[in-house]
Image (tube, rainbow, N blue to C red):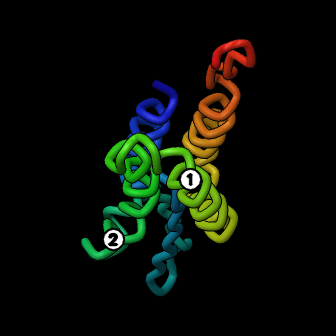
Amino acid sequence: MLQVAACLLALAAGAAALLLPTIVQETVSSSPGAEPERTTESLSLLQTHPPTILIPLAVPPILTLVPLLVPRRAAWLAGIICSALLFGFTALAMASVGWFYLPALGAAVAAVVLRKTARPARNPKAG
């Protein structure tokens, strides 16, 4: 369940990073003999970047989806690898959109940790 939450959080983070105003642009226009006119505008990534910005924003949702798609026996290892890659992506993107992905990273790490600790212990008396 936590891995599904991580995937949904990564999708929500990508949508928020793409659509929320994250860039403030100030323009100053002046004409001779008049005071300069300042205009401040808040823009989103979608407004300031070409559609190719969707490629890096698709990486975190894909990384959180992989552990859900692999066979059950390999899901824990895939979760570790994908969580490490998601950590790297988040750390590299921290100056811009990386902060948006921290909740998804937390859920992905929790899914890996709880999956390992939730395994039932073997019964030593069986045999």
Q: Quadrant of residue 111?
A: top right
Q: Residue at x 39, y 53 (%)?
A: 66
Q: Which residue is mark 1?
A: 77
Q: Is 8 above or below relative to 65?
A: above
The local secondary structure at tag 1 comes to helix
- What residue is shown at x 35% (from left), y 46% (from top)? 71
The image position of residue 25, as x and y in percent, is 50, 67
Task: State the image quarter where residue 112 is shown.
Answer: top right
User: x and y percent of residue 92 in the render?
Assistant: 65, 71
Question: With 58 as the anchor, is 76 left or right in this view?
Answer: right
Q: Residue furthest left?
A: 51
Identify the residue at horizontal 41%, vertical 40% (top origin): 72
Q: Are marks 1 and 2 in contact (CB under 8 Å)?
A: no
Q: Residue furthest front?
A: 127
Q: Is 8 displayed left or right of 52 in the figure? A: right
**Looking at the rendered structure, which numbered label has been put on residue 55?**
2
Q: Amino acid at mark 2?
A: Ile
